[in-house]
Image: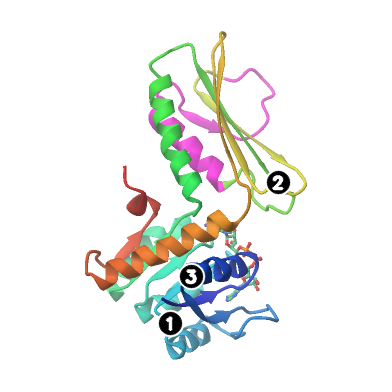
Amino acid sequence: MKIALVGYGQMGHMLRSVAEKRGHKVVLTVDTFAEDADFKPASPAETAAKIKESGAEGIIEFSHPTSVMGNIEALLPLKLPLVVGTTGWNDKREEVEKLAVKDGSFIFHAANYSIGVNLFYKIVAQAAKLVSNYDEYDCALWEAHHTKKLDSPSGTALEIAQLVLDNMPSKKTIVTEAFHDRPKKEELHVSSTRLGSVPGTHTVFFDSSADTIELTHTVRNREGLAMGAVRALEWLRGGVDDGSIKPGMYSMNNILGD
Ligand SMILES: NC(=O)c1ccc[n+]([C@@H]2O[C@H](COP(=O)([O-])OP(=O)(O)OC[C@H]3O[C@@H](n4cnc5c(N)ncnc54)[C@H](O)[C@@H]3O)[C@@H](O)[C@H]2O)c1
């Protein structure tokens, strides 16, 4: 597939390498600042025009939370399968989905493209459901990331926390601050550590007086994220080509199955 990359930073470079290893051709890289990008746009409209000209058959967008909405709005009318990695626009999800349906376009978004993390979500949900049959178990979450990370706790930790709430009726609220008092039984504590270069670790603890069950996902490198995004684009392009998907918004649940 001929692919255009919007945002040619750390993820953009990794995406190029993974896409090429999977036999695709990156026909255009667009970045407002990166010296080695093919095109430096002055506006999202310029990005869209250049992509149209490039003959790309699919787009992957990993830019910046302040740029992503402008890019989505400019790129959807191209009607090319669009995979968005940039986070920070969750509150606009419904609006974007409506826009995609209206424009007859196809968009895919995951807050985390790692196949392993998405499998981990399913494992945690199932574990929480099983453990909740036994009153004696408490649950907490811990995550660690590098010191350049801007948000805390990570979006992934919050997603995992929500899965615990959905599947463990004894837990009703998420607490991300330090406790200055004893936690209430219904509070799910999510704690964060920022340390050196850690690419991303998430641990869920189920604890009783007799034992602890620990489930951990550890990121080794960013390749898994890029691989998930390229696979998402392959899935979207395939679905558009064989007519098996309708215009709208898709997520990892659509490609992972049960
Ligand atoms: N969903 C996921 O699985 C996942 C994984 C990793 C990173 N991310 C997110 O993806 C984004 C990019 O991550 P990164 O590590 O590559 O960041 P980065 O800072 O290394 O690269 C981002 C690049 O986007 C460029 N950019 C900014 N605005 C632009 C615009 N309007 N048009 C084109 N380029 C633009 C910047 O100049 C920069 O080179 C971040 O928001 C990050 O949180 C998501």
Label 2, residues with CA under 10 Å away: few <14, some 14-19, many ≥20 = some
Which image quadrant for residue 105?
Answer: bottom left
Task: Tell me the element at label 2.
Answer: loop
Which quadrant contains ligand 1?
A: bottom right
Q: Nearer the viewer, residue 23 or 42?
A: 23
Q: Is residue 101 magenta?
A: no
Q: Earlier in the sequence, mark 1 or mark 2?
A: 1
In the displayed structure, would residue 104 be above or below residue 49? above
Whether the residue carrying mark 1 lies under 8 Å from ligand 1 is answered with no
The magenta stretch is: 155-183
Q: Earlier in the sequence, mark 3 or mark 2?
A: 3
Label 3, residues with CA under 10 Å away: few <14, some 14-19, many ≥20 = many
Q: Nearer the viewer, residue 178 or 156?
A: 156
Instruction: Tell which residue pokes out farthest to the right in this image.
Output: 196
Quadrant location of the C terminus in the rendered image: top left
Residue annotated with mark 1:
56
